[in-house]
């Protein structure tokens, strides 16, 4: 398997067991070694009476994107920390895109940045999170090193 | 109105327009000036195949608790940033409690800490967030000062 | 040794090798299991032309306080992350106090809060950090458990 | 003045009043609209007995880089928050490089990322911070918009 095929295979395995991301209507638009792009439409149940998306769903989308990006090397990793900065509200009906990119890895710790953008391309939120590998594999064979420091 | 009555009145007004917190089954257990305690049960749709709660829902609970705590002074405030540290997984069926406490205020900025605990009282996550007042009131009359620095 | 004596002994050992905290004129005012209080005067070399302390020195004071708090159990721990919120400027000549308290521990990860206050008691900054135990001891004998989750 | 010339002029003015960055031996290697690169050598007074740089000085370098990047539009901005993740220790004698890039702007809030690298090019720390414009100019004339959202 190439690194891209491995990333896809890990994502498929995770997706199958991820009620939460599926239940919120997320879609995986792209996945690769250390990266993932997810989309989610802001639904009625995610907004307050003013049509503004609860920040928690924006975090959740970004957190899912980090999960797929960080689990792309055939080694399971868990989120240890996530910090999100809200730049503008998400609006009812718009499709949010979360682009996760690996920023650094050292030992078992990974650092990921996720930008969440709105339908007009403007930035809705910036997320940074840490993950920690837990020494379990998705498939038989070696974990893939990625750009581990 | 006393500060406690004001906090309750603001919370009632926010709650009525908050589809998101309601839709996730949250309950307000207590609210006061600069503080709030919310409860939420970890439901099927929040977990992955292993019965572990998606971190996004833990963040969402904490973010809602901060919202009620920071909107308790008759001045609307929005979340500007939220950072969560995950200590242990939330489990299917357990009731999570989020306790939000104001840590500091300076000008329009508030700093809040939220501890999320599980059914056994152990800490599931620690959240810290920033809010920013937007100069709008819930009710006629003065905003209440709280422990503004 | 009692936990308090152990905390003091670990602090003494760390302090002896800590050029950085010493060089900035810090003083340890108190130390216990999972807690520490440090003081530092804002000196000329720490300020800009307007007499305002560079935020980096405020972070450094808080980071040192976390270091002494987290290394109080006879197990060496390193800072993995630190986040600081600046509430008001530190002023030339004032003595800043950093109070570090352990917020949670789970496995080798610790979460610490540090409040930095000014001479008038008002809050200058709020810091939150993560530490990670590295499996080394200061002294022969067992590491002490603290309030590990 | 071009945006690049303005960024340089603002940096010169800030630098002249910045005892702190000067006193730590920092150098501005580059500055532009929304970006800055600073260098600093890890000196004796910054390390502990094991030759490892106190994390506070790494934060301070990153914070300074954010300051020059965020003050490049002829509008003064202050750091409101800074979060740093430590990836590997800084070593005595090595020159650290901090590269600050604007990640987003919305209203008066800016979000900046700063990567701190060591002499071998590997990542020492990743920093993310928020700044807030305070409505003061360095020079007569308009503030420059940058990529404000």
Image (cartoon, coloured by chain):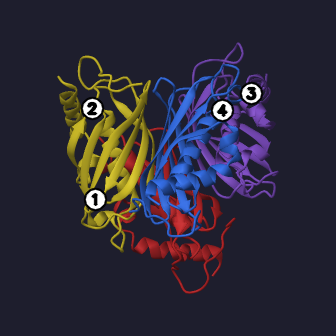
Chain colours: A purple, B blue, C yellow, D red
Q: Nearer the viewer, mark 4 or mark 3?
A: 3
Residue matched to label 3 = A19
What crowding class fits label 4: few (fewer than 14 Cα within 10 Å), some (14-19), or many (20 or more)?
many
Q: Nearer the viewer, residue D55 or C65?
A: C65
Looking at the image, do the residues carrying marks 4 and 2 touch, with CB atoms under 8 Å apart?
A: no
* Coordinates of residue D94 in the picture (x, y in percent): 42, 47
Residue matched to label 1 = C121
Res B43 visible: yes
Q: Quadrant of the N terminus of chain A?
A: top right
Q: Do the residues at pointers 4 and 2 share their chain?
A: no
Q: Chain of mark 4?
A: A
Tag 2 secondary structure:
loop
Q: Quadrant of the C terminus of chain A?
A: top right
Q: Do the residues at pointers 3 and 1 share their chain?
A: no
Q: Chain of mark 2?
A: C
Q: Do the residues at pointers 4 and 3 share their chain?
A: yes
Please, is residue A138 above or below residue B129 in the view?
Answer: above
Residue matched to label 4 = A70
* Coordinates of residue C114 in the picture (x, y in percent): 36, 46
Looking at the image, do the residues carrying marks 1 and 2 touch, with CB atoms under 8 Å apart?
A: no
Res D118 visible: no
Looking at the image, do the residues carrying marks 3 and 1 touch, with CB atoms under 8 Å apart?
A: no
Please, is residue B50 above or below residue D73 in the view?
Answer: above
Please, is residue B84 above or below residue B17 in the view?
Answer: above
* Coordinates of residue C42 in the picture (x, y in percent): 27, 62
Label 3 to label 1: alpha-carbon separation = 49 Å
Label 4 to label 3: alpha-carbon separation = 19 Å
* Coordinates of residue D139 in the picture (x, y in percent): 53, 83
Residue matched to label 2 = C33
Label 2 to label 3: alpha-carbon separation = 41 Å
- Closer to the N terminus: mark 1 or mark 2? 2
């Amino acid at each position: 398997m190439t690194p891209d095929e491995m990333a896809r295979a890990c994502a498929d395995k995770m997706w199958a067991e991820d009620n939460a991301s599926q239940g919120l209507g997320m879609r995986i638009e792209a996945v690769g070694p250390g990266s993932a792009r997810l989309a989610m439409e802001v639904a009625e149940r995610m907004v307050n009476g003013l049509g503004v998306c609860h920040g928690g769903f924006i975090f959740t989308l970004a957190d899912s994107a980090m999960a797929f990006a960080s689990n792309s090397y055939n080694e399971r990793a868990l989120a240890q920390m996530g910090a999100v900065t809200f730049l503008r509200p998400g609006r009812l009906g718009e499709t949010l895109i979360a682009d996760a990119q690996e920023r650094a890895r050292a030992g078992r710790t990974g650092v990921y940045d996720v930008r969440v953008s709105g339908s007009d391309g403007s930035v809705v939120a910036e997320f940074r999170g840490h993950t920690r590998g837990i020494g379990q594999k998705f498939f038989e064979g070696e974990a893939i090193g990625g750009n581990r420091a």
